[in-house]
Amino acid sequence: MFIQRTTYSLFLVLFLVFSSSIIFGQDSSTINFSYKMPNTKTKNGVNKEHYKLLEQKIEGIYNQRENNFLSTQTPFEIVPRIEIVDEKNAGDIQTVKVVKVAVYLTITEAELQTLFNQFKTTVIVTDKVLEKAITKAIKQIKTSDPKFKIFFTKAEANVLAYYEKNCAKILKSASTHIERKDYNKAYGLLKYIPENMSCFTDVEHLITKIYTDNKDDNCKKILEQARNQKAYKDYSSTLYSLVFIDSESSCYPEALKMAQEVKTLMDKEDAEAFMPPHEERKANFAKLSHLEKIRMLAAQARILNLNFIQE
């Protein structure tokens, strides 16, 4: 019983966190970036720990900006590079080094092969050990430097301008993928287009088509997942999966039947604790638009055993 309650609580948190971000909204014009950790070994004194420290520094700079945060759910990457520009001894003191460190940041989108902005800053530090000097240099980067704000603001503006200019082309490509039933690729093209773009009504129409085309198939796959969970007597997970079956899908009556069966299989105490929240979340999911539903399904695709669409 305790395990079921713990599992159910975890799923409940996942549901509430994600649904609240949809229902209560994200700034539709916000562009978020991820930090691309270089796959690098130590080179000229620069190592992975330096890049981790730089990530913390960038996160601190970026998070100061309203409605912005570093995210893994974005195609726009901050690609860092740390380079030793100059290194020399400090006069007659042979053990102390004067090191000039350059930090480069590039914001790109790998699939689009598009560059959105570049940034460079240099710092001069001294230390006996090169690796420590590099650490000092990164720590000395000022998060209050207005150049960083300009860097991110310009990158966001360039991303928005890219989508505004290329939206028709993206819509055409997405439509072709939908015709070929390659829904994952279609959604991949559409999901990051900001809602304040002039073409977003057309974007939403295509995303709605992706959702409705897959509604019955999703129902079957989620139901199969729920059956397996039920067979293992994991009733909390079963109920969680059933929440995401659309009330207009062909197998919805079977989903209702399974939920009632699970209720009878549960301990009375568990049933009283689990069923009312299940009904409430099911009702909340039903109220979402197709756009909101597909975003939720995409985020939960691996949990729900869906392969037509994944984040």
Image: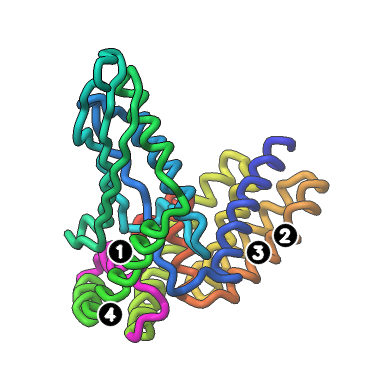
Inspect the image, locate mark 2, and give the three-letter code of the amino acid beneath it.
Answer: Pro
Identify the secondary structure beneath mark 2: helix
Identify the secondary structure beneath mark 4: helix
Disc 1 to disc 2, C-alpha distance: 32 Å
Q: CB under 8 Å between callouts 3 and 4?
A: no
Disc 3 to disc 1, C-alpha distance: 27 Å
Magenta range: 180-198
Residue at numbered disc 1? 188
What residue is at 73 percent from the left and 57 percent from the top? 275
Q: CB under 8 Å between callouts 2 and 4?
A: no
Q: Nearer the viewer, mark 2 or mark 4?
A: 4
Disc 3 to disc 4, C-alpha distance: 36 Å
Residue at numbered disc 3? 281
Sooner in the amino-acid sequence: mark 1 or mark 2:
1
Judge whether residue 87 is colored magenta.
no
Q: CB under 8 Å between callouts 2 and 3?
A: yes
**Residue 58 percent coordinates (x, y):** 41, 47
